[in-house]
Amino acid sequence: MTEKKFYRPNVAAIIVSHEYPEIKDVFIAERSDLVGVWQFPQGGIDEGESSEEALFRELEEEIGTN
């Protein structure tokens, strides 16, 4: 018997250089809890939160934007 996995909706950001496409720098960070695992800023959408609100909250939590 296979176990069903349920995932909540989430958001992610791909952040590129303000000089893109001339300069093709992309922001990606190593996870603090898993060595060698890299990802874009991302996270789940909380109940009652819009995807835009979740994106800005996750960016603030993960990389300190405000």
Image (cartoon, rainbow, N blue to C red):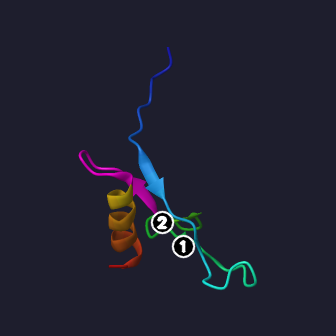
Residue at image location 27% in from the left, 51% down from the top? 49
How far from the left and from the top, in percent, is residue 59?
Answer: 40, 70
Along the polypeptide, which appears first: circle 1 or circle 2?
Answer: 1
How far from the left and from the top, in percent, is residue 46?
Answer: 28, 49
**Residue 46 among magenta residues:** yes
Give the farthest residue toward the right: 22
Q: Which residue is mark 1?
A: 29
Q: Quadrant of the C terminus?
A: bottom left
**Residue 48 among magenta residues:** yes
Q: Main secondary structure of the magenta part?
A: loop
Secondary structure under badge 2?
loop
Name which quarter of the figure residue 3 lies in. Answer: top left
Q: Are marks 1 and 2 in contact (CB under 8 Å)?
A: yes
Name which quarter of the figure residue 20 lies in. Answer: bottom right
Mark 2 crowd level (few <14, some 14–19, many ≥20, 10 Å Cα): many
Residue at image location 51% in from the left, 64% down from the top? 13
Mark 1 crowd level (few <14, some 14–19, many ≥20, 10 Å Cα): some
Which span is picked out in magenta? Answer: 42-51
Give the farthest residue toward the top: 1
Amino acid type at circle 1 is: Ala
Is 35 left, or right, of 43 in this rendering?
Answer: right
Q: Which residue is mark 2?
A: 41
Amino acid type at circle 2 is: Pro
How far from the left and from the top, in percent, is residue 26?
Answer: 64, 75
| Residue 56 image label | none
